[in-house]
């Protein structure tokens, strides 16, 4: 019984040490910012054209690339930070991501396309009641 208890406490101690080692080596994701985050169009379905500014900062120098869905837009080599202005055309909400050379996503942001006039609701032309 004592042997099992000692073995159990030893394995728990080793497990805790391993988890602390893994936590110490994992680094925080890069700070990733895209502005503006919303694009306005007159009606739903129209294409939005705008210039976005992308900024990122990371604790370590890395080779990172900016993607729009699966399309590579811009890359930085051996950098801790990056900034770029890009002209984009969007017909719907679009996800932009920062990926490493192995295509692992380190950070992502979504730009939303909003319509000024929603096709979901129709304006009422006449009231339901009248005095005459």
Image (tube, helix red, strand yellow):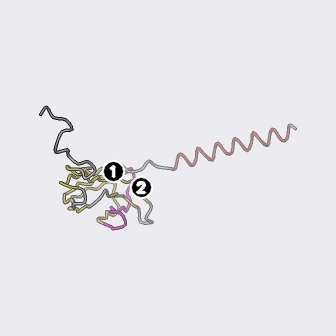
**Magenta span contains residue 61:** yes
Question: How far separated are the C-alphas under marks 1 and 2?
Answer: 9 Å
What x and y, as percent, mark residue 66? 33, 61
Q: Quadrant of the N terminus?
A: top right
Disc 2: CA contacts within 10 A as few (<14), some (14-19) or many (>=20) = some
Identify the residue under disc 2.
106
Give the residue at x 39% y 61%: 99
Residue 131 among magenta residues: no
SS for callout 2: strand
Magenta region, residue range: 58-72
Quarter-wise, where is residue 71 in the image? Answer: bottom left
Q: Nearer the viewer, residue 69 or 17?
A: 69
Q: Residues within 10 Å of mark 1 (few under 14, many from 20)?
A: some
Residue at horizontal 12 percent and vertical 34 percent from the top: 132
Residue 103 position in % (x across, y down): 43, 65
Magenta residues, dominant SS class: strand
Residue drawn at 31 percent across, 56 percent down: 93
Q: Which residue lies under the disc numbered 1?
A: 32
Q: Residue furthest bottom?
A: 71
104 displayed left or right of 96 = right
Q: Residue furthest front?
A: 132
Tell me, yes or no, whether the two marked residues, 1 and 2, touch with CB atoms within 8 Å. yes
Q: Is residue 67 left or right of residue 39?
A: right
> Please, is residue 123 above or below residue 84 in the view?
above
Q: Is residue 5 left or right of residue 84?
A: right
Numbered label attached to residue 123 = none
């Amino acid at each position: 019984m004592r042997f099992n208890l000692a073995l159990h406490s030893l394995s728990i101690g080793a497990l805790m040490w391993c988890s602390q080692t893994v936590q110490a080596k994992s680094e925080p994701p890069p700070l990733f910012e895209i502005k503006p985050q919303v694009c306005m169009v007159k009606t739903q379905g129209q294409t939005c054209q705008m210039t976005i500014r992308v900024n990122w900062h990371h604790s370590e120098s890395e080779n990172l690339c900016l993607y729009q869905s699966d399309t590579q837009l811009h890359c930085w080599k051996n950098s801790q930070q990056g900034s770029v202005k890009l002209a984009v055309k969007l017909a719907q909400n679009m996800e932009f991501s920062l990926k490493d050379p192995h295509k692992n996503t380190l950070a992502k942001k979504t730009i939303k396309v909003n319509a000024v006039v929603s096709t979901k609701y129709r304006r009422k032309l006449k009231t339901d009641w009248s005095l005459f």
